[in-house]
Amino acid sequence: MQKKIVIIGSGFSSLAASCHLSKAGHDVTIFEKNTTAGGRARQLKRDGFTFDMGPSWYWMPDIFDTFFADFGKKTSDYYSLNKLDPAYKIFFSDDIITIGDSMEKICAEFERIEPGSAKHLKKFIGKAQKNYDIAINKIVLRPGLSPLELITPETAMRVDQFFKTISGQVRMKFKNPKLISTLEFPVLFLGAKPSDTPSFYSFMNFADFGLGTWHPKGGMYLIIVAMQQLAQSLGVRIHTERPVEKILVKDKKAIGIEVSGEKIYADIVLSGADYHHSETLLDPEYRQYSEAYWSGRTFAPSSLLFYIGFDKKLKNVEHHNLFFDTDFERHAQEIYDNPQWPKNPLFYANFPSVTDDEMAPQGCEAGFFLIPIAPGLSDTPELRSKYFELIMDRFQTLTAQDARNNIIFKESFCVNDFIEQYNSYNGNAYGLANTLTQTAFLRPKLKSSKVKQLYFTGQLTVPGPGVPPALISGKLVADLILKHI
Ligand SMILES: Cc1cc2nc3c(=O)[nH]c(=O)nc-3n(C[C@H](O)[C@H](O)[C@H](O)COP(=O)(O)OP(=O)(O)OC[C@H]3O[C@@H](n4cnc5c(N)ncnc54)[C@H](O)[C@@H]3O)c2cc1C
């Protein structure tokens, strides 16, 4: 029988869930607080420049293919993908590592830095590929209801990899600190320090070196546009500028939501907004997790972001650039162990207009700069300016050019914006980290244990942070809902 389902938020997870639920024949409506759909993946357009405000790395193309294939579609029905070569470049204080689009190119670069390292790399990536197959085809598709989900013949054989860390594993075979940082970089997407991330997660290294880095022409936002089109073609209604103020509960059952004082009744309520915020929409007795629970979790970092229009083409930069010319360990401690504004942060800079002329006017460059910081830090205009100057100095020196005088405009985004625009807990940028104690069944649950007919999805529940996991989270919750109705 057709059920009425309301969804809070329009991020990747909500849009994915809406498509699956609508395809199954249900009446689905999304309520989004912001003016456009997409959540953290919104787009900023200014003076002919286009910026993806959040995600910029298109990794794990197979997950996107699978999502669209579930609806008889292909990614190419909506956007065209370009495999980046080089995938990215890492600036160190005394060298630059370039990651090409094939294992041959990457092995040659490793040999240049540390002779003999290519054979270790091939073995490491071979093992990472097996972990990828197990993680993506078996574990990640389970809803995190029980520890037994993690036990498969394949994981039983690799149980040690859940108790060793990626950091330890990398250091066993690679000695050069630059190669170590290069191999530790992909797990930063999981939101925790490599020294707190189980070595099983080396599957992220296969995603990086094995599957490559892609770019949808026009930007990552085109995936949101595609999913929106797909959802609407399946009958989903998407309402923007409709912040949900309350989840209505009667007899311990979710019966709808309240938006601008209007009660909207439904059979099922699903929230893809940040889990902590979603629970604050409930009266306290219906919340499953206390404030103490949330404050004791390891969150993925927040970020200080700058979106900049440059009036010239920049030299010596690629589409993706990492600036690892400072101490990785110290910055990680300032994010996780002793939260404070970093003394000398690593940063990331993205210039999509290097490979995609739709992203900036002719002869100009669109620049996105990101400094990862601890969630919950004080966020003031003075601090934003101080860090802008600091990274701009380093950027100019490391890329050997003047760029500051070519800025047409600059916009920033930080902790206060994450809170104000997404109702993000402490201004986290990308959810709850994936550590050993916050993996799978140890994460906040997809289904409320206190309120019937109430479900959650997104980067704070299973499987975790990132766009591909958000697509999977939407499918997992839709499957769970369909099983229960
Ligand atoms: C700066 C940045 C860079 C990133 N880089 C990458 C990357 O390169 N690659 C990658 O794979 N991932 C990246 N990520 C992570 C990725 O963007 C997220 O994991 C993913 O987009 C999360 O999707 P979601 O559906 O869980 O939630 P969200 O995108 O947060 O969606 C939640 C939605 O709920 C809405 N909402 C909140 N409260 C309410 C309310 N009361 N009523 C109605 N609506 C509400 C919000 O406005 C938002 O639209 C990045 C994230 C950030 C912030």
Image (cartoon, rainbow, N blue to C red):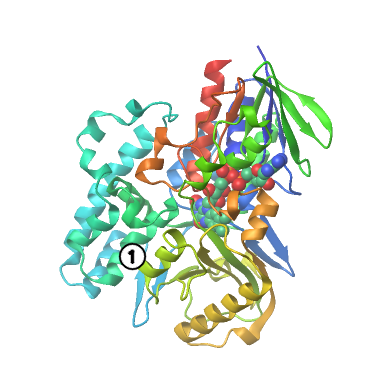
Q: Is residue 454 above or below residue 239?
A: above
User: Residue 9: x percent and y percent?
Assistant: 67, 40
Kind of element beneath mark 1? helix
Q: Is residue 387 above or below residue 160?
A: below
Q: Between 363 and 404, which is closer to the camera in this rendering?
A: 404
Amino acid bearing label 1: Thr
Determine whether, in the image, residue 326 is placed left or right of residue 199: right
Determine whether, in the image, residue 76 is placed left or right of residue 409: left
Mark yes or no: residue 78 visible.
no
Q: Say which quarter of the image contains residue 234.
A: top right
Q: Quadrant of the C terminus?
A: top right
Q: Quadrant of the N terminus?
A: top right
Determine whether, in the image, residue 49 is placed left or right of residue 93: right
Q: Give me the residue at 62% from left, 49% from top.
A: 424
Q: Say which quarter of the image contains residue 241.
A: top right
User: Label 1 belongs to which residue?
Assistant: 182
Q: Between 111 and 184, which is closer to the camera in this rendering?
A: 184
User: Residue 12: x percent and y percent?
Assistant: 58, 42
Q: Residue furthest top?
A: 1
Q: Is residue 397 above or below residue 279?
A: below
Q: Say which quarter of the image contains residue 362.
A: bottom right
Q: Give me the residue at 52% from left, 39% from top.
A: 471
